[in-house]
Image (cartoon, rainbow, N blue to C red):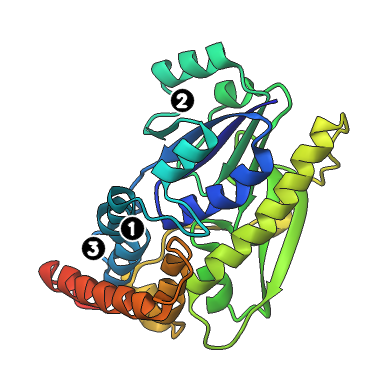
Amino acid sequence: MKLLLCTKNDLFGAIILNYLLPELRHHEIRILLSDKARTGEDTIPELRAEKFLEREYPLQHFFPTLDREGITGQWLTFNALSAKFGTSIECEYDINGTGSTQRLTTWAPDLILSARFSLIFKPHILALARLGAYNVHPGVLPGYAGVLAPLRALWNAEPSLGCTVHQLDRGIDTGPVYSISRLAATPGRAVQSYIPDLYRLGIDSLLELVQSIESGHRPKLAPQDTAAFRYFRPPTAEDYRAKDVPLFDFSDYTKLLQQFSPADADSESRRGSYRSTVESLLSQHLKQSAAPL
């Protein structure tokens, strides 16, 4: 099948592709990366820090160094993934525009698979995928639609977090649900530390869905309860000040980085180096922005 994979140009987008590509290598793949700014990420200190850790440090510092030195680990950078799996990885800024529409119409994908993609698909793009379009949303639908669902769930003291696989339709996070997977919330665990595990749950379910469709089965989908639907917009600075949930953990973050490096005798020293570098650069970054965290 022809599969259009859509994710985000950031650290977690790379991790998502590392989950997906080894399992889909027998398909014809195209990959699009969104690179859209989030509301408030240049003015709210917490979102500035998140942007730095998820996008600026990996894309401007960490991944280029690995690519330049030819270093690979369990996980691969975007460039290394492209080389290993022989597929192009392109940034997409206007998925619904004339150019993208023409290219995708010509290519004619069988399935569109989205996870962490920041752009909204309009109906004419969704209609191009003859077998449907599906999204991995890191929150339980219909109660946690919109952005930063794990953060909202933790702010609401939910006992568990979830990841939903649903069909894409003309709304945002409104399509019928294929599956909801959950993991327990752990007191004191940082929001960012949940993200790889949540997407792992959703990707496992998405792969089952793809296999089922490939076998000729029609997915069983459940419509969402519109009365229970809640859509969350980006938090305000006041929202962050009113809550006491850790946003990131440098130890967990550097463990993620280490997955992109070889497992060898220098692993522990490399992790320490990653941590000190990231902490220093983040501190400088926030000071330069005149918005200390």
Contact, CB < 8 Å: mark 1 with mark 3?
Answer: no
Estimate how packed mark 2 is, as few (under 14), some (14 to 19) or many (20 or more) residues with alpha carbons within 10 Å: some
C-alpha span from label 1 to label 2:
28 Å
Q: CA distance from mark 1 to mark 3?
A: 21 Å
Q: Amino acid at mark 3?
A: Thr
Q: Which of the 4 image quadrants contains residue 50?
A: bottom left
Q: Earlier in the sequence, mark 3 or mark 2?
A: 3
Residue at (60, 33) in percent of width and height:
170
Horizontal and vertical percent for residue 64? 28, 51
> Which residue is the site of mark 1?
58
Q: Residue at x 58, y 41 (%)?
A: 114
Residue 79 image point, x, y percent:
39, 42
* Label 1 SS: helix
Q: CA distance from mark 3 to mark 2?
A: 28 Å
Q: Position of residue 240 (x, y in %)?
A: 38, 76
Instruction: Name the residue: 45% across, 37% down.
Output: 83
Q: Which residue is mark 2?
A: 96
In the image, what residue type sits under mark 1?
Pro
Q: Which residue is mark 3?
A: 43
Q: How many marks?
A: 3
**Quadrant in which the C terminus is drawn:** bottom left
Foreground tag (1 vs 2): 1
The answer to whether 6 appears left or right of 70 in the picture is right
Q: Note whether 114 is above or below 107 in the view shown.
A: below
Relative vertical location of residue 62 with respect to residue 33 in this rendering, above or below:
below
- Quarter of the figure that contains the N terminus: top right
Q: Secondary structure at mark 3?
A: loop
Q: Amino acid at mark 2?
A: Asn
Horizontal and vertical percent for residue 292? 19, 77
Verify CB contact (< 8 Å) between mark 3 and mark 2. Answer: no
**Residue in view at x 29 percent, y 63 percent:** 52
